[in-house]
Structures are given as structure tokens and as C-alpha cells.
Image: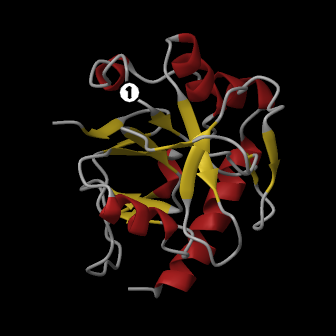
Amino acid sequence: MLSKPDLRRSLRAARRAHVAAQPEAIRALLFHRPPAPLAARIAGDAVIGLYHAGPWEAPARGYARFFLEAGHRLALPRFAGRSAPMVFAHHKDPYGESDLEVGPFGLLQPAADAEVLVPDVLFVPLVGFTADLARLGQGGGHYDRWLGEHPGTLAIGLAWDVQLCETLPTESHDVPLDAVVTPTRIYGLD
């Protein structure tokens, strides 16, 4: 089995090629709203944690808009500094992103004065996943640490089908997901 860094390189290349091969019009239709079986599991008053997707990641913006219109409060990760723990802060504008600023990792995040929230449901980015819901993240451990500190949070990965792996190397601190949604399938939610 490849090491985690080698797997990340290989999976990122496959993901980039997969996304680049999809016409823009098709990509715009994917991840527009959560599948009904997933939406049915989410309480009406749940705080929804999402992420601001990079160009090759499964997009989360459609889900953010869907949940905002359904009356949920949204939260995105925020870092006070590169060595600071990840927290989630209120995200009010998934249409214009007027409440976001560039954070220490170069990603958009809620402004420093945004209210800190604790998501009940967390949509998680990933580099790879397995059918039994193991997740390979970016390598910083931020989501595993946060989920480890917040047991009971419904953790759902968003991924392209090409990110499915037969197996992944896991360690004791790796937190499995409750579900993974791809454009063609839902894994988990049994």
C-alpha cells in the first residue's frame, strides 16, 4: 500500500483530471442539493458546517445555499493562525461570500468577528475515502481533531466518484465518516 503522502499525490491527480474532463455545465449541476435520504436525517434546527471548496474539491456551495434557504445557520472553518485550532464560525452569505476573508492558509473563511458556532452536521472535504467510510484528508488533521472533540456530530464527506479507494491506511486518531455523498451514490446512512 502507498504511504499517505503518495496516496494524496495520486488521488489529487486523479481528482484534478476527473474534474477537468467534466464540462462546466455538468459540474454546475452536481452537488446542487443534498440527496433526500440525507436531508431527511438532518433536524430543522441543525447548524450546518461546510467548507469553502478548492477548484478540484467536491463543491459545497450548493449545499450551503440549500441549507440557508431551509432556515439553517451555516458555519465554515476559521483559523486564527496557522498553528491555531480549527473552529467554525457563522457564514451568512453563500451567494456573494461578502462575509469571508482570506485566512492564514490562503482559503476564504468567516471574518474574525463572526460568531463561533458548533455544527450539528459537518460536511467534510476529502482526498480519498473507502466504502466503509474511512477518510483520507489533506494531511493537517484538523477535521479529525475537531470531530474527536465533538462526538455525535454527523460527519458527511463530499467527493467525486474517482476518489473511492478499496483501502486506506488509517491510524487511531482518524475519525470515520457517517456517510459520503458522490454524484452517483450515497455511502453509509444505514
* Camera sees residue 91: yes
Is residue 163 placed above or below 187 in the rendered structure? Answer: below
110 left or right of 75 in image = right
Of 52 and 179, nearer the camera is 52
Of 108 and 113, nearer the camera is 113
Q: Which residue in the structure is indicated by mark 1?
A: 46
* Camera sees residue 30: no
Label 1 sits on a secondary structure element that is: loop
105 left or right of 141 in image = right
Give the residue type at disc 1.
Answer: Ala
Residue found 60% across the figure and 44% down from its top: 89
Residue 16 % position (x, y): 70, 57
Of 190 and 122, nearer the camera is 122
In which quadrant will I find the C terminus? Answer: top left
Residue 81 % position (x, y): 71, 71
Is residue 61 placed above or below 16 in the rendered structure? Answer: above
